[in-house]
Amino acid sequence: MIRVDAAEWRSTIAGFHGSGCTLFGFLTGVDRGDSVEIIGRVAHPESIEAHLISTTIPAGGTLPSLNDLYLGASWHERETGEMFGITFAGLTDARPLLRRAQQGSPPLLKSSVLVARVVREWPGAAEASDDGRRGGNPSRRRQRPAGVPEGFMQDEADGRSAIGGT
Amino acid sequence: MIPDEAHGVIGLQPSACTSCMICVRECPTWCIELESHTEEVSEPGARRPKTINVLDAFRIDFGLCMYCGICVDLCPFDALAWSPGFDHAASSAGGLVHGINELVNWWPATNPSPAD
Amino acid sequence: MISLALMEVAERRTPERAYRVAGAPALRIVVLDVGLACCALEVGAAITAGLLVPDVAGPGVPKGIDATVLLISGTVTDALAPGVLRAWDAIDGARHAVSFGACANTGGPYWDAPTVTKGIDQLLPVTVYVPGCPPRPEALIAGLLRLVDETATA
């Protein structure tokens, strides 16, 4: 994988495009905490030549769009933009694909708590020693379901400001 | 022709289940519910009675189940197994939830009882 | 492709891809497949296995059909839900919705996703739910025959 600065993202990929890698593979993001890593793949349509290119931008940051070079990049940039909360400057159609406009926080950021996991009672919280009592044995530290951070369980503290989506 | 090993439904052997909750906690769709209580049993020769879990209810919501088989794979006591049944459509979403009575019947005939 | 299939059902009102259930004499039904994800492959398998028979009458709902079945096989997102509803509204006469697979039943593997509809029964009345992820082609036919039974006795 080729790692480049955000300033060289477009020029690097444009260089590959110019040398014959006109096939757009995919583009996606990875939440790195304070930053988002963007990874793209372009390939030569008639050879095995292919390149994975990666860059890192601050959370909520901006990257120049590739959709004038590769039409196929539009879909991926729309999706990555709405799922990771970043902007692709120059993207002709940036309408959200799956999310309603401005609803919650971007779902693929790790800080987005899936509200369904908080609202639904986790069946795994039950213990045999609860002896059928709902809410269970208060002396025991409750097990927590995967994907629900501390402080988000029904019987825990209030603060649920990070809940994303619906 | 449906092969015996087809992943149609999941059968339960209640006598093998120790109510350890591993299947419930590892299920990605939270589709398993288990209710149990503890009982003390005295064994001859033992100093104190030992505490065992007794299974009261076991339900799988096949409307939610993603048929991943993690519960079957992870059960330390082989109390869960795949069964090839397929004719389990229901006229309500609640009709896809099945308890011990149905799950016992779906214990595959090809599987020896783990309790044996 | 997904939206094309939906458009076909929703806009033309006379879908070309309609199927009958082999061996269901009690009630003649036409199945409109709304294939949205991997479950649609099992519907395809049911067709190649001869369990679902392509309707020879061509476009439009043929005469002598008692009911039209909207078969939702796959994941319905909130973004796509209006399209499914349009397909449902476009059916003339007696109609039933069959929910095929975990996604259509409850959201299934995407039960916690903020973008997925948690069961199509939030959108429209479902007559029969077929469990599975995905259900086998045989499960589809069993579900359709159950629908035939239930509607025949109703």
Image (cartoon, grey):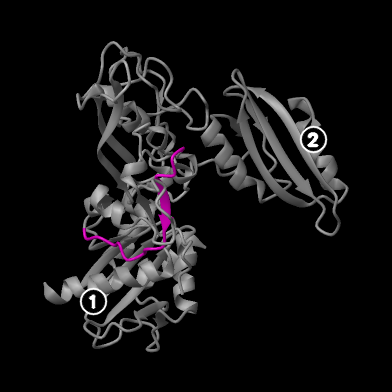
Q: How many marks?
A: 2
Q: Chain of mark 2?
A: A
Quarter residue C13 falls in: bottom left
User: In the displayed structure, would residue A14 be above or below residue B112?
Assistant: above
Is residue B60 visible in the rendered image? The answer is: yes
Q: Which residue is mark 1?
A: C67
Disc marking residue B1: none
Question: What's the residue at 43%, 56% (across, down)?
Answer: B111
- Name the element at disc 2: loop
Q: Is B9 part of what is drawn in magenta?
A: no
Percent of width and height locating residue A84: 55, 31
Residue type at the position of mark 1: Ala
Q: Which residue is at the front of the view, C5 or A109?
A: A109
Q: For the stretch drawn in magenta, what is the main secondary structure?
A: loop
In the rendered structure, which segment of residues is drawn in magenta?
A: B76-91
Question: What's the residue at 59%, 31% (across, down)?
Answer: A87
